[in-house]
Image (spheres, grey):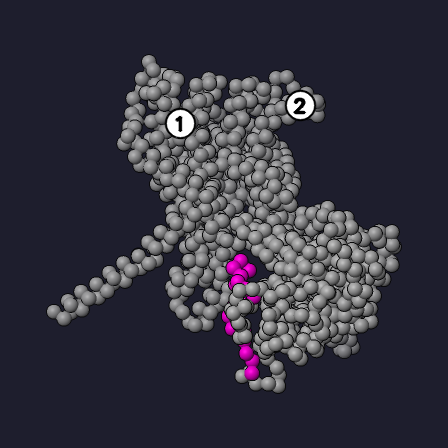
Amino acid sequence: MENAVENKNNKFIRYLKLIRQHIAQFFVKYRYFFIKIGISVITLALTVILLFFLLRLIPGDIVQEYALKLQGNRGIPYEQAYELAKDLLNYDPNENIFEQFGRYIGGLFRGELGVSYIETGVSANTLIATRLPWTLFISSVALFLSFFIGTAVGCYAANNRGKLVDKISSGYIAISGSIPDYLMALLLVIIFAFQLRLFPNAGNYNAFETTPGFNLPFIGSVLYHAFLPILAYTLVQTGTWILQMRGSAIGVLGEDYILSARARGLSEHTIHKKYVKKNAMLPMITMLGVSFGALFGGATLLESVFNYPGIGLEISNRIISKDYMVVQGLIFFSSAMVICVNLLVELIYPLIDPRVRRAA
Amino acid sequence: MVINMNKENIVEFRDVSIAYPLKKFTLQAVTNASLPLKKGMITALVGESGSGKTTLASSLIQCISEPGKVVGGDIVFNDNGNEIFINKLKDKELRKFRWEKVSMVFQAAQSALNPVMKVKDHFIETMNQHGMKKVTMEEKEAKIKKLLNFVKLDVDRVMDSYPHELSGGMKQRVMIAFALLLDPEVIILDEPTTALDVITQYFIFTLLKKINKEMGISMLLMTHDISVVAKFADYVAVMYGGRIMEYGDVHYIFKNRYHPYTRGLIGATPSILGSTKDIEAIEGNPPNLLDLPKGCIFNPRCKYCQKICQEQEPESLSIDNMSKGKCHFYKEI
Amino acid sequence: MANIKEFGSKVWSIICLVSKFIYESILIPIWNFIKKIFKNPKSAVGMSILIVFILIGIFGPLIFPYSAETDVANKYLWPSLEHPFGTDWLGRDVFRQIIAGTGNMLQISFYTAIISVLIGTILGILAGYVGGVVDKIIMSITNIFLSIPSFPVYLLLAAVIVINGSLSFALIISLFSWAGLCRAIRIQVVSLKERDFIQICHVMHMSRTHIIFNELMPNLFSYIAINFVISMRNAIVASVGIMFVGLAAYDPTNWGAIMQAARDKGLVNVQNVIILLYPLINIVIFQASTLLLSNGLDETLNPRLKVM
């Protein structure tokens, strides 16, 4: 009888040990992933702290201002308005800095990124919902367009080093590298929108003649308005991609496996496609991921040159109108997206590059 | 100028010169080199680093590293009595010729495989590109397995590995198996054991000797290890500053040491039995290919240098008469 | 007496050492560096243009002094001998405005480059050389600055803090621009540390200061020099961008401010477009010259790239 109990106990302990072993093995096996995730979480936390202190730099008592405004708008007594303002802004200047920080973190966890105290009913969340799609539309189209053009041209230029194509692409790199993207945008706007009047100089679609939805005039109008921003972005970005891909491909061309592939009698086509391009692309994919993460912040200047209502334009307008709570929320959002996308890239990368896969 | 090929030779280098045109000057890496490779034999090419061994050998499959070019002479392959002028092959013919007739084991076997492809895929890809697309997958895999088995590798593991997962010795053996893939007649071995430990070196050379004996594949072995040459090679050619100095049977060359450079080279090799006092390095530095000395290019380092050596370059070896060394006083000193 | 003498000789020896150090470790390398710059055609052209800009920045305002007085009667004049670039909407000379703005632009870019290179190099070497916890802390700080989008924060700071000069402007821009440099330097240091010559120094128990200043620094020098030029480029892009949004308008002659003002006046008017083009072209020339300089430096200082 006693023996049976002991046996059962032993069995139980053995199971426990086994489970613990499995968990340990699980952590060891996916150590790479856990370390990456951990680093990202720490970075995010530190970013939150930094942004919190950035907000404390803002002079003046924003709660008081907002309360006065609420008082005027809603016709409620000042005390009540002040309480309401504190709640809405999620910020109490009378608390000490730790309590304020706690409040701020709480807001973030509830998903409240920041309320506007200039416009009622507007917050960072609503702005992200309405503006982000436009930003992502133009910038991701431009990014992928320039990525594909740039890597193809860069690879081709590397294969034909010193020939005419290479010289032309080097010249293009130098020119596009000397013009900041917003100045390129400005030139395009001046030429095509203000002087030739071929394209609109502001907005994302014609609100008077089209209705948003899945219809042809609307889509046409969107594309028509997005053309110049995408062109400006692509023109400048393509140069960078050509430069990077060319460098990467030239590095690969010097590798021994290219020579040995040639000695094996493989066709140049196969060598370029399976050997040069595949290996040269690996670092490009990481860079593409990082660039994609940066898109979520919007291209502030580009959007403001085209008056294109994306996140970037929103940030610059709200900074000028001193709507700092919203700005803070938007900056937090874009930093968080950068960190998340970088993490995703790092987690996916082992699937692409076998060398990292096994090492991980 | 048609020279009928000696039946015994599988490859003949006839007065080959190879140059690298660079921006400001042209670098002559190989000058008037003539060299036969005897069928079924191992011919060794010895010389210091930078003497043009690799350049000469890679001209055999027209894989000279950019921007090198054959600027003179012919490289002729004996394809069962038909002469193939390798340096005049068109791109398509050349692609077929490479690996089917002549394959190569590279000096840097460590990085000679595409890092993003599995070992197996390298083999299959090469077979596909050499007109074996229609062969079934099973047959291909059976062939790969046979080859990997032959070089004594753990077949199942290696086939599905990526190159970085193999050790240096394993990669070298994969490369040797790889070189045998299309049953070539000649294999070029470019310092096949440089980065390997002594035991693996021995293993690899025994393996190569076995391939040579059992399959009758001729080999061109490049090395600066004289002891390896003495042990494994049948013929030896000594190279210095892009020129062939002496050629002949290994025993004949090593025993007589007629050429002063060969004498120096052998004298500089330590032996296990002798004391280190007997080692004698060759004085001076290898020649600067951009600024060659007048006359015999070995004269600044030669102990037996005479007046004529500083004025006139000795005659180069020619394919018809390989027994005369490139020295004014060959067999006299 | 003896004390004073001893003290004097000590001071003298220190002066000797310092001057020797300045001569050998600063003057000679700088001279060699300048010689190297002018050997490569790319960096020679880039450097020459940059020197022209610097000369204009220093002596331009003395030769062509600018007055902000308005003269509405002479507004929108076409280019003439008196006004080489014409006049703006208030009758001010555009040519003199641009010359007056040159010095300011150069100051911003130099200050930013100096500050960010200083911070980036020190932190990068510290992180890479010391390693361990220090490395982790510095790298996580660097990561934050790399993941927060920099431009919105520049705008925020420019709106919150009053920018009243090129130094404060440069401080704001370098708040973010050091981070990328720090990471790059750290990677370099980590790879150098594994090299044989540094390992030998460790084995020989050489002091850390010796290793850092005599062994690491000369090898990092080319890297730092190139990044200095790149920081200058980025500073121009960022500062003009900030002014482009309409913030930090402390100096109306700054190129960004001129462009912003012309843009505000309306780009349908060709006159405004022309006024805007002068600073724009200048910025493009400046960017092109620094690009040439950094590429040329890269070619001369990292010879392995030359073969490619």
Q: Residue at x 37, y 17 (%)?
A: C77
Name the amino acid, label 1: Ile
Describe the element under mark 2 as helix, strand or loop.
helix
Residue B282 lies in the magenta-colored region? yes
Task: Please give left or right for residue A290 compared with residue C163 in the image.
Answer: right
| C233 with respect to B274 (left or right) | left
Q: List the single residue furthest toward the front.
A: B308
Q: Position of residue B98 (x, y in %)?
A: 76, 56
Q: Which quadrant: the N terminus of chain A?
A: bottom right
Q: Which residues are magenta?
A: B278-296
Q: Nearer the viewer, residue B309 or B269?
A: B309
> Residue C193: percent from the left, percent from the top?
49, 63
A309 to A290, vertically: above or below: above
Q: Amino acid at mark 2?
A: Gly
Task: Examine the rendered structure and indicate whether residue B265 appears above or below residue A124.
Answer: below
Residue at image location 54% in from the left, 49% down from the top = B23
Inspect the magenta stretch and tell me whether residue A108 lies in it. Answer: no
Residue A133 in sight here: no
Rendered residue at 72%/57% (across/down): B75
Label 1 SS:
helix
Specify few, some or many for label 2: CA neighbours under 10 Å numbering under 14, 14-19, or 20 or more: some
Mark 1 lies on residue: C258
